[in-house]
Amino acid sequence: MMAEFPVMSGADGHFAPADMTCLKCHRSLEHGGVTSFVYLSGGAMLMSENRTTGHADDRLSGFLSIGSWSEREMDRGPALIDIITNLTGGQFSIQWCSVDCMRQWLLGVLAEIERRA
Ligand SMILES: [Zn+2]
């Protein structure tokens, strides 16, 4: 089953899923009082003028997309999946319970790109 997209947008916060479950298998990321996960994180920091310090800022808008584009098929546009759109604060972390779940989820996204291309 393919995930719903986008995974995060707007004022969703910085972590997905927000309920600390695996994005692929939906199991809790906490077992016996210990939280562990595999993650994909990214974004931007708003830097001071001298670029020595930075912080998340609600003026930033985060995004993450995976796509395929061909000059031969310009009329059709890109095969695109927007994973994160217009995320307030600009920073994100997407979480899975294991490398295997992360791999399966990412391979599912890539298979969907292939299907749409
Ligand atoms: Zn999982």
Image (tube, rainbow, N blue to C red):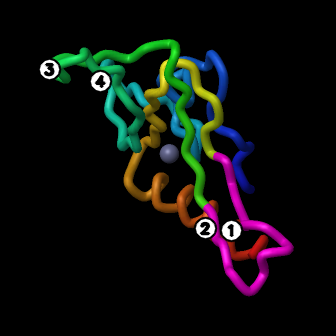
**Mark 1 to mark 4 CA distance (whole Å):** 35 Å
Residue found 62% across the figure and 45% down from its top: 83
Mark 3–mark 1 distance (CA, rounded to whole Å): 39 Å
Sort mark 2 into few (<14), some (14-19) or many (20+) by Cα contacts within 10 Å: some
Does label 4 point to a residue whose CB lies under 8 Å from ligand 1?
no
Residue occupied by mark 3: 52
Mark 2–mark 3 CB contact (< 8 Å): no
The percent coordinates of residue 26 (x first, y second) are 59, 37
Which mark is in front, 2 or 3? 3
Q: Secondary structure at mark 3?
A: loop
Mark 1: secondary structure: helix
Q: Report which residue position mark 2 lands on.
A: 110
Question: Where is residue 24 shown, x and y percent of the image?
Answer: 58, 47
Q: Secondary structure at mark 2?
A: helix
Q: Which residue is mark 4?
A: 34
Asked whether the residues under the numbered discs 2 and 1 touch, taking CB atoms below 8 Å apart as contact, a structural biologist would say: yes
Query: Please, is residue 46 above or below residue 86 in the view?
Result: above
Q: Residue at x 40, y 25 (%)?
A: 30
Q: Looking at the rendering, which quadrant does residue 46 occupy?
A: top left
Q: Residue at x 24, y 17 (%)?
A: 49
